[in-house]
Image: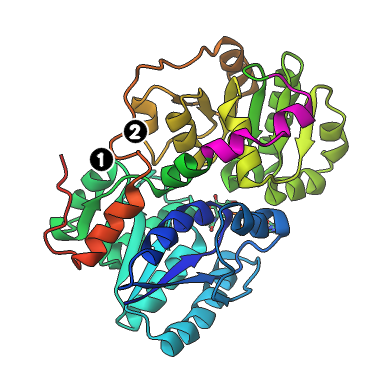
Amino acid sequence: MTILNVVGARPNFMKVAPLHRALEQHDRFDSKIVHTGQHYDEQMSDVFFNQLELPRPDVYLGVGSGSHAEQTARVMTAFEEVVEDMEPDLVVVVGDVNSTLACALVATKLHVPVAHVEAGLRSGDRRMPEEINRLVTDRIADYLFVTEQSGIDHLRQEGVSDNKIFFVGNLMIDSLVHFREKAADTSIVEDLGVEEGTYALMTMHRPANVDHEEGVRALLRIIEDIAAERSLVFPMHPRTRNRFEEFGLEDELTSVEGLRLLGPLGYLEFLRLMETAAVVVTDSGGIQEETTFLEVPCLTLRDHTERPVTIEAGTNELLPLDPARVVERVREVAPTDPSAEQPRYWDGRTADRIVEVLEAEGHEASVPAS
Ligand code: UD1
């Protein structure tokens, strides 16, 4: 059974790595990696292949950046040739990036079954490009692998039949469990001269926060005010760096005292920084989940989350991009309750559950929704 695992953007790599590893252990599966090239920089892509011990992609499409239509169309055109050429038995797409949607569409139209990992998550906000990608991908996928109960609930509400839905847990947590010790050996915390358990860690890149000047100015204010009170580490996404430049705010940012401003980090370095932070301030999807598993308080600067289990777990809180409120919460934040329960199936064994479903070709292996 030839399986094409699609990766495109940074948050995809840590989801595909454990699945590829698990598939490789079974003679029955021939697991291949297709990298669309949506992310292409050394620090946005190559470093993840090295650190996550992923082999070089079998196919690299090199699509690069562009508008949504351009990027999606380029992935589709290039991936269509790959599917026609390799004739896979299954295409696996993960998450909610443009490459996810593009490859799911191509495979389905060529009558190749599609598995979507991280199915059923919904923010309810159709202005987020990821929400459209999730909705369409789930509509056409054949196997819907779900990370949390809300995923099952949404898919059922949308009329998806139970025999397509598999509650398997969170592949990203498989990577975290696998690489946690290795991350602890990195020297990033010492190199930055920050003290474990005291500093704030920030990531910001959502278009809704950084694609307009008002948002970037609010973000700058938040950075200044947090850094005035405690060390702040901010590995900046290229989109965000571009926006600071575009709005002429780069000099103000680089001169903030107490701020460790960095480029994008490798997986292991970022994992270590998350694990020993006092608080994480983010607008990422995956970081809300990783901090839940690590029991580190997370403030998510968005109006809604497609990962409500992180709120229920008590580690994550939503806040608007409002400097006064964010700074106040960063000041007050207390360690999370270590006795709180982890979300179901976030245990490092999700890849094995997916393989079990694929081995049974979907029959009988369905993990029933609770
Ligand atoms: C994409 C995903 C988002 C995910 C994020 C993680 C979509 C719609 N969005 O957003 O869900 O959370 O990845 O990073 O798929 N750039 C570089 N080098 C790179 C890649 C991008 O410099 O390797 C710059 C380019 O200027 C590009 C911009 O970043 O135009 C945005 O990249 P893009 O892939 O369009 O979206 P992200 O914001 O990264």
Q: Quadrant of residue 187?
A: top right
According to the picture, the residue beneath numbered tag 2 turns out to be 309
SS at mark 2 in the image? helix
SS at mark 1 in the image? helix
Query: In the depicted view, which residue is nearer to us: 34 or 255?
Result: 34
Residue 95, above or below 63: above
Residue type at the position of mark 1: Gln
Residue 253, above or below 157: above
Name the residue furthest left.
364
Q: Quadrant of residue 66?
A: bottom right
Q: Where's the C terminus, which quadrant?
A: top left
Q: Where's the N terminus, which quadrant?
A: bottom left
Q: Quadrant of residue 100?
A: bottom left
According to the picture, the residue beneath numbered tag 1 turns out to be 149
Residue type at the position of mark 2: Val
Q: Residue at left 29%, top 60%?
A: 355
